[in-house]
């Protein structure tokens, strides 16, 4: 007997949510039953149109939060922007799981592995809930939790695990992230929150701590932060912000977990607003953007992968892979134990059912 599809709601239809709708529509084990949106302009529109599909799906978006929750879905695929409202978003997610609704979410990213980052009482609130919460995506997410830990299974000795995102963000449309959080287009030394001591450890510390947990490492405290901001050498126009010559055009940062002072787990990001900026920094083998994992030890291991959309560039496909990591995880998260579910808790998640005959 064929099992009934899991009933799913998509929460927000921005750069990730619109792709989540399309992914749920294609997934044989999932059924879209509701969509929540924050703007009156989107309210009442068919989900298929909001997802950019060429047809209606028969599900209308709603701004009525309580009405959408009253649908009692098996899972919410939460894709709302959280970078500028971290603690409000944690409150939302906590309320969802306390109401008995499972959630997969693209943020806040610190919930990927919040132990040692969030106050214990905030984590305990989620752990006591009757439903499951899993936060993931591509980075933070699969590229720096499942992929590196799987790669280490080939090791005889591990000296250091380094995970990198190397990307040209010129076509990435997210003005809040690009201008307000990263500071692209502002003075190189602008007083942006992301570059204040301790903030990188909160934002990406979950990556370093989860890899360390998977390798049974006890890290020194605090994590080590390194930031190198560089000016643009010419005017650059991106999808989100205009970058004038001399303003911040590229940044490289590292978040380093040490053991007895020796670097053991390192997250590194190299973010450019044009491909030719700071050529002495590492670049992707194929241009555009990539994720790279380097395991130094015996043997020396290195893997790099890139992606691009069928009808778009790597920033478009970056939103697709983020959405699909969530969508494809729904059955495993619904079946998981209640409380916070990390990548270390989940079984192998695949694209089961997505091959088109």
Image (tube, grey):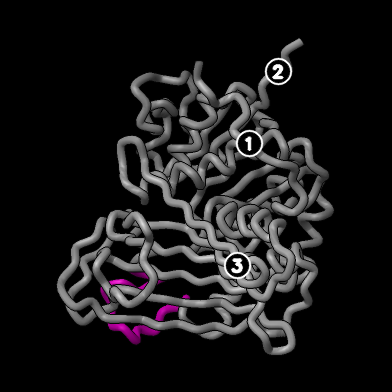
CA gap between label 3 and label 1 equals: 27 Å
Q: Earlier in the sequence, mark 3 or mark 1?
A: 3
Q: Where residue 23 sits: x, y (%)?
A: 50, 32
Is 138 included in the stretch rendered in magenta?
Answer: no
Q: Where residue 180 sits: x, y (%)?
A: 37, 70
In the picture, measured across the screen, residue 250 lies left or right of residue 118, that is left
At a point 58% along the width and 55% down the height, the residue shown is: 141
Label disc, if present, on residue 350 of the rendered structure: 1
Q: Where residue 136 sits: x, y (%)?
A: 60, 52
Q: Which residue is mark 2?
A: 4
Q: Which residue is mark 3?
A: 300
Q: Residues within 10 Å of mark 1 (few under 14, many from 20)?
A: few
In the picture, measured across the screen, residue 232 lies left or right of residue 20, that is left
- Give the structural element (helix, strand or loop) at label 3: loop
Q: Is residue 146 visible?
A: yes
Farthest bottom residue? 261
Q: Is residue 266 above or below residue 152?
A: below
At a point 56% along the width and 59% down the height, the residue shown is: 140
At a point 68% along the width and 49% down the height, the residue shown is: 134
Farthest front residue? 299
Q: Magenta region: which residues?
A: 179-194
Q: Nearer the viewer, residue 154 or 247?
A: 154
Q: Earlier in the sequence, mark 1 or mark 2?
A: 2
Q: Is residue 38 visible?
A: no
In the picture, measured across the screen, residue 15 lies left or right of residue 119, that is left
């Amino acid at each position: 007997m064929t099992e009934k599809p899991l009933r799913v709601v998509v929460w927000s239809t921005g750069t990730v949510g619109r792709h989540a709708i399309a992914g749920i529509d294609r997934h044989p084990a999932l059924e879209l039953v509701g969509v929540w949106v924050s703007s009156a302009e989107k309210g009442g529109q068919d989900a298929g149109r909001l997802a950019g599909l060429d047809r209606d799906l028969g599900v209308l978006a709603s701004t009525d939060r309580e009405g959408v929750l009253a649908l009692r879905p098996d899972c919410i695929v939460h894709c709302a922007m959280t970078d500028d409202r971290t603690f409000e978003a944690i409150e939302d997610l906590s309320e969802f799981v306390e109401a008995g609704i499972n959630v997969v979410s693209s943020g806040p990213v610190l919930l990927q592995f919040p132990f040692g980052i969030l106050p214990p009482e905030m984590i305990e609130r989620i752990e006591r809930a009757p439903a499951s919460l899993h936060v993931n995506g591509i980075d933070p997410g699969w590229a720096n939790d499942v992929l590196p830990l799987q790669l280490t299974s080939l090791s005889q000795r591990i000296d250091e695990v380094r995970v990198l995102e190397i990307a040209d963000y010129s076509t990435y449309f997210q003005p809040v992230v690009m201008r307000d959080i990263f500071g692209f287009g502002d003075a190189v030394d602008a007083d942006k929150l992301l570059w204040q001591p301790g903030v990188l450890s909160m934002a990406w510390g979950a990556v370093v701590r989860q890899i360390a947990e998977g390798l049974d490492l006890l890290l020194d405290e605090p994590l080590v932060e390194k930031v190198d901001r560089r000016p643009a050498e010419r005017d650059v126009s991106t999808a989100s912000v205009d970058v004038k010559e001399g303003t911040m055009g590229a940044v490289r940062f590292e978040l380093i977990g040490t053991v007895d002072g020796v670097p053991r787990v390192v997250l590194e990001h190299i973010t450019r607003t044009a491909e030719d900026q700071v050529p002495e920094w590492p670049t992707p083998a194929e241009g555009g953007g990539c994720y790279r994992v380097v395991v130094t030890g015996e043997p020396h291991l290195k893997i790099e992968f890139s992606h691009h959309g069928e009808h778009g560039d790597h920033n478009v496909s970056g939103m697709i892979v983020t959405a699909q990591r969530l969508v494809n995880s729904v059955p495993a998260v619904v079946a998981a134990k209640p409380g916070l579910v990390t990548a270390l808790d989940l079984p192998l998640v695949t694209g089961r059912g997505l091959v088109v005959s």
